[in-house]
């Protein structure tokens, strides 16, 4: 039990240390972000044409719906 408390106090002391980050920590973080971007960007780029098509379809559907609502508003056919 005392080993747990000792470990936790050392960890909390290390977390409270405000000297900054080491170059190694910054490089590891940068490497991780680079890998995540390398995975995410191609996926996003491949999904973009589908998103554009979906937006175009919604716009085409929206025009007649807008005309219908205007006709109802003005009580005309």
Image (cartoon, rainbow, N blue to C red):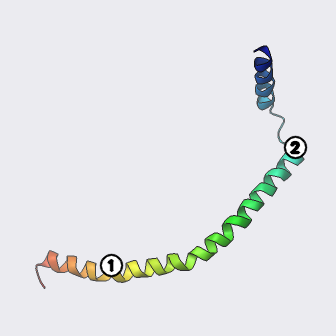
Up the image or down, 8 lies above or below 23; here it is above
Q: Residue furthest top?
A: 2
Give the mark nearest the N terminus, 1 or 2: 2
Q: Position of residue 60 (x, y in %)?
A: 36, 83
Q: What residue is rendered at 67% in x and 65% in y?
A: 40
Q: Specify whether 49 is left or right of 65.
A: right
Q: What residue is rendered at 81% in x and 24% in y?
A: 10
Quadrant of the drawing holding the N terminus: top right
Q: Specify whether 22 is left or right of 47.
A: right
Q: Position of residue 12 (x, y in %)?
A: 76, 26
Q: Which mark is residue 77?
A: none
Quadrant of the drawing holding the C terminus: bottom left
Secondary element at image label 2? loop
Q: CA distance from mark 1 to mark 2?
A: 55 Å
Q: Residue furthest right?
A: 23
Q: Position of residue 65 (x, y in %)?
A: 27, 78
Q: Which residue is mark 1?
A: 62
Q: Residue furthest left?
A: 75
Q: What residue is rendered at 70% in x and 65% in y?
A: 39
Quarter residue 20 falls in: top right
Up the image or down, 41 lies above or below 28; here it is below
Q: Residues within 10 Å of mark 2 (few under 14, many from 20)?
A: few
Quarter residue 30 falls in: bottom right
Secondary element at image label 1? helix
Q: What residue is rendered at 13% in x and 78% in y?
A: 74
Q: Nearer the viewer, residue 20 or 39?
A: 39
Q: Which residue is mark 2?
A: 22
How many numbered discs?
A: 2
Q: Residue furthest bottom?
A: 77
Q: Residues within 10 Å of mark 1 (few under 14, many from 20)?
A: few
Q: Position of residue 59 (x, y in %)?
A: 38, 80
Q: Specify whether 51 is left or right of 61.
A: right
């Amino acid at each position: 039990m005392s080993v747990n408390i000792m470990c936790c106090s050392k960890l909390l002391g290390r977390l409270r240390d405000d000297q900054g980050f080491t170059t190694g920590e910054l490089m590891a973080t940068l490497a991780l972000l680079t890998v995540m971007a390398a995975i995410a960007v191609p996926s996003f780029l491949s999904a973009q044409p589908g998103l554009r098509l979906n937006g175009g379809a919604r716009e085409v559907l929206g025009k007649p719906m807008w005309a219908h609502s205007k006709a109802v508003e003005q009580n005309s056919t």
